[in-house]
Amino acid sequence: MPVRLFRFFSGFGLAVTCLLLLLILTWLSTLEQPAKGLYEVQKRYYDAEAWYVVPELDWLPKINGKPVSLPLPGAYLVSAVLFVNLFLGGILRIRKGWKNIGVIISHFSMISLLIAGFVSHHYSKEGIMAVYQGDISDFAQSYTEYTIEVAEIVNGEKEKPYVLPTEQLKSLAADQSRVFEIPELGIELNVSGWMRNSARVKVDKEDAGKDVIEVDGWALQWLETNPTEELNLAGCHVDVFVEGEQEKTARLVLHGGDPNACTITVDGKVYGLRLMREIWPMPFQVRLDKSIGEYYPGTRKPSTFQSDITRIADGSEQGFRIKMNEPMRYGGYTLYQARWEDSGDRPMSGFAIVKNPSDQWPKYSLYISILGLTIHFGMKLGGFVGKSSKTKNKETTSDQATA
Amino acid sequence: MFAFSLRLLCISMFSLVFCASCRKAERIVVNERRDLTVADQGNHSLIAVMPPEWRQVPSTEFRMLNYRFGDSGEVFVGRSRGGLMPNINRWLGQFGKPAIENADELRKVAMLGQEGVLVTASGDFAGGMGRAARKDAGLAGVIVALGDQLITVKMMGAADAVAAEQERLIKFCEGLRIRSADSN
């Protein structure tokens, strides 16, 4: 049994199946992207939790008016199986020797490529730092991921906030609730009614039906999800419980578009709760000294932009110019200019900030792959040339002998 | 070998479906805190110390700071233009009160380093600025001139509730301050 299992997982057939599945998944997800949006498609096809995916394409054949349901394994799962397969088949099972060294190196490069994908998927972070000319910023904000921050407000100023994990919020279904306990504050938050896209609407207490949760004259309205995830404004209801009490202390309606927090008071202390896109503090500050750009004629789409910035870190200041395709790298962070606007009284530069520990690994994997394949095909070519010349010599010798 | 592979594939599929149906933990302990950044300074330059009896609600286009108290009382901080007296008389007019000539007779409140005036009224509120007409309503508000604009702090609600909260409102106004560049 273990031998058959080993053969199955290290087999050539499984490798081909995985590669074909990855090809199909890439193709289908690309076709779905224009209608569903990049974020949604990535989540459905490539997320670690997307064990399987059912493609939703208009041209799929229909039975009784309903499109055929064709479940396929998720790309993450297929990649994991491919990793196991390559490791068992390409490293352990493969016949070792100088003749196969090129193939082993190539297999190793594919494994390292998959590891790079894994590290990037789980440990990379991306956000945007928007700075107006003359201002200083020290944070990036996620494009898409919402969190709820809870902070005590002392003398009108916010203390360091507690951050609810984004994964645990965005995985909430509309009819699901989840309890977040903050032991140091002695409070529990029961988050429910999660809406990926919503609007805050004014309602009268008297008019609010049984199904409408109204707080201070406001309620949430569910909206269709926008394919451009950045435009979606999440919303949820939060019931606040004080440790040891059965009755809830307060109910809040939180909306992603709110510019400030809603507060509760517990034992005379004021706490602010805000649903917002995740904030990511930077270990340096960026002062935008000059922001220059141009729009395509008659549009608001920038054709070119560049920014002169000063990076302030560890008590020292250093000037940089960030241009298209010319980022600034510092401390494992990469700053690309991704946006430019000149609609207000001052121009604004938006820097995409990426931290990816495996940023350069795919490049190195490709170098290793080139090396492996060069060795392998070089050896094959050498063998072929050697064999050909031997055959030629043999033929020449036999021709001379015949003559 | 083929039959074995097929069986293995079926087992894997069932395992996957089972795992996919597993729900995440419904109770999560939160200990993670993040450092403060310039994003935590808010979208305006005012720092307000809110009485714990009030609750802050989201600000709107015309309300930089927005609070509620009791069942239906509200307090909001906004900017206005048009001069001190026209604004005082507009507020009074909402309660059907006669206009006044000058602000000398009004109580003075120190706010944002300036001397503001306290405007009070009660009775039937005629409605306005998106709010419905209301009987037995109360108003207490402070207006202060700051440069070329006015900063207003207005409290509205049931007449008795507003009267009970008036001293808290004055304390709130006195505690308002403008964020300096080195704050936070």
Image (cartoon, coloured by chain):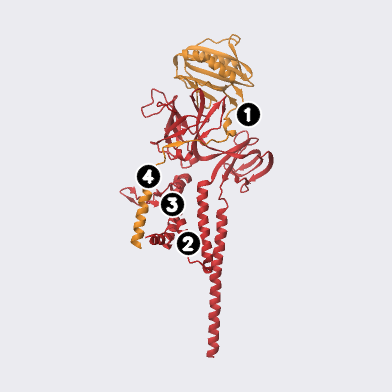
Residue B21 - label: 4
Rounded to the nearest angstrom, the CA distance separating label 4 from label 1 is 49 Å
Check disc 3 and report its element: helix, strand or loop: helix
Colour of chain A as rendered = red
Pick whichever, A46 or A298, lies toward us.
A46
Marks 3 and 4 sit apart, C-alpha to C-alpha, by 16 Å
Q: Which residue is mark 3?
A: A77
Q: CA distance from mark 3 to mark 2?
A: 21 Å
Q: Share a chain, discs 2 and 1?
A: no
> Seen in the image, is B72 located left or right of residue A314?
left
Q: What amino acid type is highlighted by mark number 1?
A: Ser
Q: Which numbered dot is residue A92?
A: 2
Instruction: Please determine if labels 3 and 2 lie on a single subunit.
Output: yes
Pinpoint residue B156: horizontal percent, then vertical percent.
Answer: 49, 17
Query: Which comes before the other along the chain, label 3 or label 2?
Result: 3
Q: Secondary structure at mark 1?
A: loop
Which residue sits at x=39%, y=36%? A176
Q: Residue at x 54, y 46 (%)?
A: A124
Q: Quadrant of the C terminus of chain B?
A: top right
| Viewer can see residue B63 | no
Q: Eyeballing the image, is A319 above or below A72? A: above
Task: Give the spatial CA distance, label 2 vs label 1.
Answer: 61 Å
Residue A175 drawn above or below residue A381: above
What hue represents chain B?
orange
Spatial distance from mark 2 to mark 4, Cα to Cα?
34 Å
Give whichever of discs 4 and 1 has the lower sequence position: 4
Name the residue tied to disc 1: B183
